[in-house]
Amino acid sequence: MSLLEELYKEILLRHYKRPLNFGGLENPTVRQPGVNPSCGDSLELELRLEDGRIAEAAWKGQGCAISMASASLMSELIKGQTLPQALELAHKFKAMIIDGAEPAPELGDLKALAGVHKLHARVKCATLAWHTLEEALKE
Ligand code: ZN
């Protein structure tokens, strides 16, 4: 394994073991469940929207390391973003995972998941949180 792969693995394991924003919000504006039956990953995303921005984000659930790390990193990244910005991030993340696009700089540590593109069976694990976010922002 290369040094870079080691580093990425460490980022993912850190978020899996100690996920950020794990739990619930006092007064969520939106609550959205998401399920990936092919792996058994499930989560519930809560957002508090204020003035067209995501003021707070939290989630809980259980699943494999890839799905949990993706949700943890996402919940941190979308805080403070406007809704169009958050959807743009979802678009860029999915381009990286599904189409194998170069990781956009805005994705930060989420680039650690770029290798999932080659693990077809795990693509849905990585994108679960993001699909859930898109569903949550639909209304
Ligand atoms: Zn999974």
Image (spheres, grey):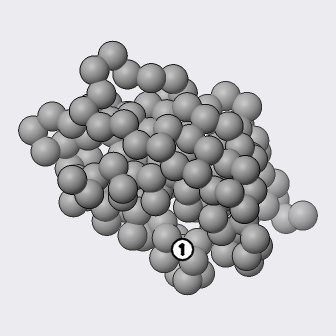
Q: Please provide percent x and percent y for residue 135.
A: 36, 56
Q: Please provide percent x and percent y for residue 60.
A: 55, 31
Residue lying at the far left of the rendered structure: 51
Element assignment for label 1: helix
For the residue pair 7 and 39, the one nearer the viewer reads as 39
Q: Does 102 sit above or below residue 62?
A: below
Residue lying at the far front of the rendered structure: 37
Q: Which residue is mark 1?
A: 96
Q: Does 88 sit above or below residue 53?
A: below
For the residue pair 109 and 120, the one nearer the viewer reads as 120
- Regarding residue 17, the answer to whether it shows in the image is yes
Q: Please provide percent x and percent y for residue 130.
A: 47, 57
Quarter location, residue 98: bottom right
For the residue pair 134 and 19, the one nearer the viewer reads as 134
Left or right of 14 on screen, residue 33 = left
For the residue pair 125 and 95, the one nearer the viewer reads as 125
For the point 30% across and 37% down, the residue is 30
Q: Please provide percent x and percent y for residue 11.
A: 69, 45
Q: Does 25 sit above or below residue 118?
A: above
For the point 55% across and 56% down, the residue is 128
Q: Does 34 sit above or below residue 25?
A: below
Type of amino acid at the residue the image marks with label 1: Met
Question: The N terminus is located in which quarter?
Answer: bottom right
Left or right of 43 on screen, residue 2 = right
